[in-house]
Image (cartoon, rainbow, N blue to C red):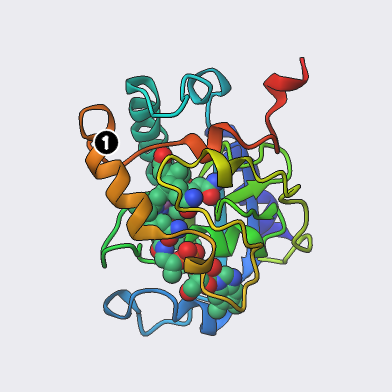
Amino acid sequence: MEYNQKIRTFLLQQGASEVGFSKVGETLTEVLLPEYHTALPLQYAVSIVVKLSDVVVDTVTDKPTHAYFHHYRTVNSLLDRLALQTGLYMEQHGFHYFPVAASQSINGYQGMFPHKIAARLSGLGDIGKNALFLSKQYGPRVRLATVLTDMPFEQETEPGGGCIGCGKCVSLCPAMAISGRAFDSRNPMQELVDRPACSDYMKRHFQKIGRGSVCGVCIQCCPVGNHTKEQ
Ligand code: B12
């Protein structure tokens, strides 16, 4: 618990909204792209969550906005900095770390390691029909980073929270890429979201807004964690 508390306090002070810890195990670190697989068993993960601005997210309608694209990039750079600072702290204490980039596609539709897996295992939330991680507190209105490490952490809570099954993401996705199936960690995520359809649509329609790499409709329309609607 000692390390959980130290890392959480540090990250919350530096601007993280939520921090989660999980024992991902060696099996899961194999999800890391092989060329990045280190010889070290990095069995633990720190999930760093930064909440998006509700005002900015709500500028998204059936398409993204320049404000959302800029916010996306700013939050990514904060996440990358927090992951690096966390890792440097780990090294100072004799441990190893691997910071997973907030947003970097390497093999087409794949990053080095999927943040959503570690965030879900940490108990901070679950994966919705929109294939996004839904934080118990903020729903999908968050971005994520992960630090894989051999610094030992204790798992704090079981997965929980999640999708209410309203189907808004299914009907409003402009790319019609969301199938409406519920998440099951035994099945490929491709069953939930058609990645090429989502990516191609963004590239074709939103080139001038977010260089074809953002959309945000499935975040904006999700009622989970949308506290602006409650007021
Ligand atoms: C490539 C990528 C894309 C691709 C593919 C999307 C996808 N669903 O994978 C495209 C371009 C289509 C895309 C679109 C979007 N993306 Co994107 N994207 C990524 C990126 C860089 C890599 C994702 C990846 O590696 N996928 C590959 C597969 C293998 O991973 P996976 O989907 O998690 O599926 C595996 C797990 O579910 C696993 N699994 C689950 N549980 C368990 C348990 C065990 C034990 C094991 C072994 C495995 C396992 O099984 C699956 C198969 O291996 C991540 C950042 C990151 N590194 O995570 C951001 C990320 C997923 N994207 C994000 C966002 C917000 C978006 C968009 C909304 C665009 C935007 N920013 O406006 C859309 C949403 C599309 C959607 N509804 O899913 C956020 C999601 C935040 C959240 N709240 O969940 C992320 C996490 C970036 C971030 N730093 O926050 N994205």
* Quarter in which the C terminus is drawn: top right
Write the residue at 67% across / 37% down: 138
Tell me which amino acid carries mark 1: His
The residue that mark 1 highlights is 205
Note whether 48 is above or below 215 in the view shown: below
- Residue at the location (39% across, 37% down)? 215
Q: Is residue 154 left or right of residue 114?
A: right
63, above or below 77, in the image = above
Closer to the camera in the image, 169 or 126: 169
Query: Can residue 33 be seen by looking at this rendering?
Result: yes
Relative placement, left or right, of 160 versus 36 is right
Q: Position of residue 101 (x, y in %)?
A: 36, 54
Q: Position of residue 37 (x, y in %)?
A: 35, 79
The quadrant of the rendering that contains the N terminus is bottom right
Looking at the rendering, which quadrant does residue 160 occupy? bottom right
Question: Residue 197: x and y, percent?
Answer: 35, 55
Query: Residue, x 69% and y 34% (percent of image)?
Result: 223
Q: Considering depth in this image, is 97 or 102 the residue closer to the camera?
A: 102
Percent x, y of residue 188: 51, 73
Q: Residue at x 43, y 39 (%)?
A: 174
Q: Depth check: 159 or 122 in front?
A: 159
Q: Quadrant of ligand 1?
A: bottom left
Q: Is 139 on the left or on the right of 75, as rendered?
A: right
Q: Is residue 227 above or below residue 156?
A: above
- Secondary structure found at label 1: helix
